Amino acid sequence: MQVTLVILKPSAVQRGILGEIISRFEKKGIQIAGIKMMQLTDETLEAHYAHLTEKPFYSRIKNSMQASPVVVLALKGLDVVNVVRKLSGVTNGREAQPGTIRGDYSMSVQENIVHASDSPETAEAEIKRFFTEGEIFNYTPYLNPYLYANDEL
Ligand code: IDP
Ligand code: MG
């Protein structure tokens, strides 16, 4: 089973849609293996958005991500990295498909509600960046037989 990182950005916290977004992951059948609220530091953000720190808009993204605490989720499931990227939709909320989180809740490139890891390798590094070992919980979902076939687990 894979674990992926989701950040519910200040745009989700301030708009009061944390529950609705988390509910989408739960209803899909994805397990919550870790969850917490935190204020992102400059250092964490620089590592997390290393591919963007040279961009002219980086300071705007940084301010946006530090505008309030965020909620971080460690989500567990089969192929969950890809599944959660698809549920999130493309970066630009105006282009994202209706039915996706960004497609349903965002009109912006920057204020796009969620971050989701983009590959299994990134997910592993990002989970380590945002969670300690003790904050990731290993428990068997009671409904597993109704979420997956035997040969999928
Ligand atoms: P992703 O979140 O869909 O993986 P990335 O290209 O990794 O997209 O960018 C990370 C985040 O930086 C985006 O989710 C968005 O909030 C912000 N961002 C990306 N490109 C732009 C831009 O051109 N203007 C403003 N913000 C941007
Ligand atoms: Mg990205």
Image (tube, grey):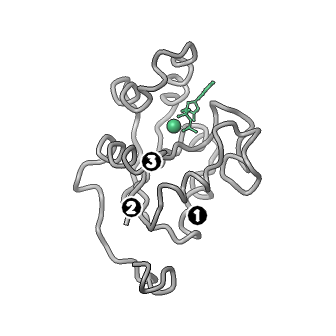
- What's the residue at 62%, 48% (across, down)? 16
Q: Is mark 3 within 8 Å of ligand 2?
A: no
Q: Quadrant of ligand 1?
A: top right
The kind of residue tagged 3 is Ser
The kind of residue tagged 2 is Gln
Marks 1 and 2, the one that precedes in the sequence = 2
Instruction: Please identify the residue farthest to the top as the structure is shown.
Output: 56
Q: Secondary structure at mark 2?
A: strand
- What's the residue at 31%, 73% (across, down)? 139
Q: Secondary structure at mark 1?
A: helix
Q: Is mark 2 within 8 Å of ligand 2?
A: no
Please tell me whether residue 54 is drawn above or below residue 82 in the rendered image: above
Judge depth for marks 1 and 3 and give the one in front. 3
Q: Which mark is residue 119?
A: 3
Q: Where residue 110 sits: x, y (%)? A: 63, 30
Q: Quadrant of the C terminus?
A: bottom left
Marks 1 and 3, the one that precedes in the sequence = 1
Q: Which mark is residue 23?
A: 1
Quick check: marks 3 and 2 in contact, CB under 8 Å? no
Please tell me whether residue 89 is drawn above or below residue 149 in the rendered image: above
Q: Is 152 in front, or is 74?
A: 152
- What's the residue at 41%, 46% (across, down)? 37
Marks 3 and 2, the one that precedes in the sequence = 2
- What's the residue at 55%, 59% (across, down)? 83
Inter-mark Cα distance, 3 to 2: 10 Å
Q: Where residue 129 sits: x, y (%)? A: 31, 40
Quadrant hosting residue 11: top right
The kind of residue tagged 1 is Ser
Q: Quadrant of the N terminus?
A: bottom left
The residue carrying mark 2 is 2
Quadrant hosting residue 21: bottom right
Q: Where residue 78 sits: x, y (%)? A: 45, 68
